[in-house]
Image (spheres, rainbow, N blue to C red):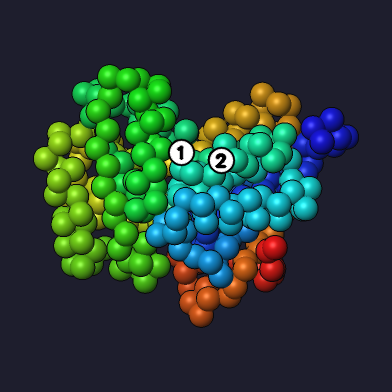
């Protein structure tokens, strides 16, 4: 409960469909170094991006319940697909603040666009949900939003093919329609896409501002914790714990690629 004593010392819970959400966790670690953070990657059921809305909601509820069992003070939905379809359902289950990556990314894009033309790239699930479009239009109805699913970017990022000719060709093909829309801002609406930022930037050109939803979410989380008087004021560095529902073969390499350092203290858990 929010009235509980010493709630500010409790961890922030973060979940994602897998390891990609470590890009969001990384932004949180950097901005909030004193916070204790619990990360859950639902690696056994990855990807969420190709699954139906109903399934993603169900899985997200299970992830939420796991984090609640760890007595977190706030929940961050790092997965864009889950943020697009599940956050309102999660907010019905808990009174704790639940922050997805969708609103912070949308807000930042709506504030930064000068010509009111924003592009959004994400998984099929995210794009199909139209959630970014709705969130941006709610902030500024005059903005035109153009969306494009870029499914292969997920695999490219996991394989570390981020800056080679395959990555470039893939980006050129996916982004050719968006490039005709005269956008000046592009939301990287998937956990994996910040890893491909350089290549995406090359293809859309330097006049297009790239929005990293993870970084924007970290700022929003900090604001929420400040407003609710829940910031951890301890001086020592926060403790980071990682949970996954499966250990994929390439877990170590991918997690290091996404987090920028090696990851210790990982436990496998079963969600029910
Ligand atoms: N984490 C997902 C997202 O941000 C990408 C991977 C998946 O499809 O599960 O949408």
- For residue 269, side relative to residue 79 (left or right): right
Q: Quadrant of the N terminus?
A: top right
Q: Quadrant of residue 92?
A: top right
Mark in front: 1 vs 2: 2
- For residue 56, side relative to residue 117 (left or right): right
Q: Is mark 1 within 8 Å of ligand 1?
A: no
Secondary element under disc 2, as helix, strand or loop, is helix
Kindly check if marks 1 and 2 are in contact, taking CB atoms under 8 A apart as contact. Answer: yes
Task: Give the camera-side residue of 17 and 30.
Answer: 17
**Around disc 2, counting alpha carbons within 10 Å, would you say few (fewer than 14), some (14 to 19), or many (20 or more)?**
many
Residue 57: give x, y in percent of width and height: 55, 50
Q: Residue furthest left?
A: 180
Residue 238: give x, y in percent of width and height: 71, 49
Q: Residue at image x 62%, y 58%?
A: 40
Residue 224: give x, y in percent of width and height: 63, 29
Residue 256: give x, y in percent of width and height: 50, 66
Secondary element under disc 1, as helix, strand or loop, is helix
Q: In the displayed structure, would residue 124 be above or below residue 219?
A: below
Q: Residue furthest right?
A: 5
Q: Residue at image x 78%, y 53%?
A: 69
Q: In the displayed structure, would residue 23 be above or below residue 164?
A: above
Is residue 189 at least partly visible in the picture? no
Q: In the displayed structure, would residue 115 be above or below residue 21?
A: above
Q: Quadrant of residue 98?
A: top right
Task: Give the camera-side residue of 87 and 6.
Answer: 87
The tag earlier along the polypeptide, 1 or 2, is 2
Q: Residue 87's mark?
A: 2
Q: Residue furthest bottom?
A: 249
Measure how far apart labels 1 and 2 are at the Cα level: 9 Å
Is residue 166 at least partly visible in the picture? yes
Q: Which residue is mark 1?
A: 102
Q: Quadrant of the C terminus?
A: bottom right
């Amino acid at each position: 409960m929010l009235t509980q004593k010493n709630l500010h010392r409790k961890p922030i819970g973060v979940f994602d469909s897998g390891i990609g959400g470590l890009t969001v966790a990384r932004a949180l670690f950097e901005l909030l170094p004193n916070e204790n953070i619990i990360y859950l990657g639902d690696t056994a059921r990855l990807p969420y991006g190709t699954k139906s809305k109903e399934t993603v909601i169900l899985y997200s509820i299970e992830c939420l319940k796991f984090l609640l069992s760890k007595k977190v003070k706030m929940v961050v939905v790092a997965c864009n697909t889950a943020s697009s379809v599940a956050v309102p359902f999660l907010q019905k289950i808990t009174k704790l603040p639940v922050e997805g990556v969708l609103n912070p990314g949308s807000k930042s894009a709506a504030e930064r666009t000068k010509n009111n033309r924003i592009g959004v790239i994400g998984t099929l699930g995210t794009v199909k949900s139209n959630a970014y479009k709705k969130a941006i239009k709610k902030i500024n109805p005059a903005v035109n939003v153009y969306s494009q699913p870029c499914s292969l970017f997920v695999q490219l990022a996991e394989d570390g093919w981020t800056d080679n000719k395959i990555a470039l060709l893939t980006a050129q093909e996916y982004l050719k329609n968006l490039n005709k829309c005269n956008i000046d801002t592009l939301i990287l609406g998937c956990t994996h896409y910040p890893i491909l930022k350089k290549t995406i930037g090359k293809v859309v050109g330097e006049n297009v501002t790239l929005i990293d939803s993870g970084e924007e979410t970290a700022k929003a989380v900090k604001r929420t914790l400040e407003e609710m008087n829940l910031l951890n004021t301890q001086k020592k560095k926060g403790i980071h714990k990682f949970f996954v529902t499966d250990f994929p073969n390439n877990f170590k390499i991918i997690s290091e690629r996404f987090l920028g350092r090696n990851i210790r203290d990982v436990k496998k858990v079963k969600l029910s």
